[in-house]
Image (tube, grey):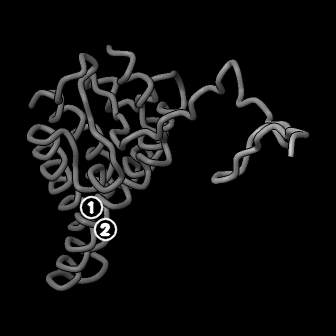
């Protein structure tokens, strides 16, 4: 793992914003389409959760395998890399996407939906533990999420010898020459 990658590990808040964007991109069309085709109750409790899980799995796995980032990650300046610093392999992308997409797929089953919610919270809560901020899907896949936005350069350290303070009269104004006076006429 390179030191630059460790220094650039994404903040949980950045990751949350990226997930919200990705969830809206996938979820809104699915929820809208499901309620148009099925009754509202069937759409919300059965069709949409399963369709969301399958679609989100494909959405994330393909984008991570090809580009190393989803649309949400691209918009927030994040990238997924393997712990070796490379773009994730297809297997890593599939593992990561499957673990994240599993909880919504369990929603239609009454007891599983509670367990899935607990799993999802614990899964994401792991990113607050450790310096690499890896959620369970990152740890299982061997990936990291890093911030690839340009970093602001640090202010240069002050010079050892700061600019000397000019004493009044020590420097002539431009265009004026201060010549020594002579008493000769």
Q: Residue at x 85, y 37 (%)?
A: 167
> Is residue 56 rendered to the left or right of residue 172?
left
Q: Nearer the viewer, residue 144 or 124?
A: 144
Q: Residues within 10 Å of mark 2 (few under 14, many from 20)?
A: some
Q: Residue at x 52, y 22 (%)?
A: 130
Q: Residue at x 28, y 26 (%)?
A: 143
Q: What residue sits right under mark 1 in the picture?
A: 49
For the view shown, which residue lies furthest in the right direction? 183
Q: Please identify, in this view, whether the residue under mark 1 or under mark 2 is nearer the observer.
A: 1
Q: Which mark is residue 45?
A: 2
| Residue 172 picture location, percent across and down | 73, 45
| Residue 63 picture location, percent across and down | 14, 46
For the view shown, which residue lies furthest in the front direction? 185
Q: Residues within 10 Å of mark 1 (few under 14, many from 20)?
A: many
Q: Quadrant of residue 84?
A: top left
Tell me the SS state at disc 2. Answer: helix
Vertically, is 110 above or below 126?
below
| Residue 81 picture location, percent across and down | 25, 29
Callouts 1 and 2 close, C-beta under 8 Å: yes
């Amino acid at each position: 793992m390179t030191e630059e990658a460790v220094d650039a590990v994404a903040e949980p808040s950045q990751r949350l914003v990226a997930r919200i964007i990705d969830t809206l991109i996938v979820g809104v069309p699915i929820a809208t389409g499901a309620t148009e085709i099925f009754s509202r109750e069937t759409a919300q409790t059965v069709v949409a959760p399963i369709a969301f899980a399958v679609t989100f799995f494909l959405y994330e796995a393909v984008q991570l395998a090809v580009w190393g980032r989803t649309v949400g990650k691209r918009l927030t300046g994040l990238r997924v890399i393997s712990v070796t610093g490379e773009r994730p392999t297809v297997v890593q992308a599939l593992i990561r996407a499957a673990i994240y997409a599993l909880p919504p797929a369990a929603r239609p089953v009454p007891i599983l939906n509670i367990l899935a919610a607990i799993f999802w919270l614990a899964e994401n809560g792991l990113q607050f533990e450790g310096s690499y901020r890896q959620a369970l899907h990152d740890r299982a896949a061997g990936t990291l999420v890093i911030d690839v936005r340009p970093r602001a350069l640090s202010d240069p350290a002050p010079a050892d010898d700061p600019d000397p303070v000019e004493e009044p009269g020590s420097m002539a104004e431009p265009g004026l020459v201060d010549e020594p006076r002579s008493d000769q006429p």
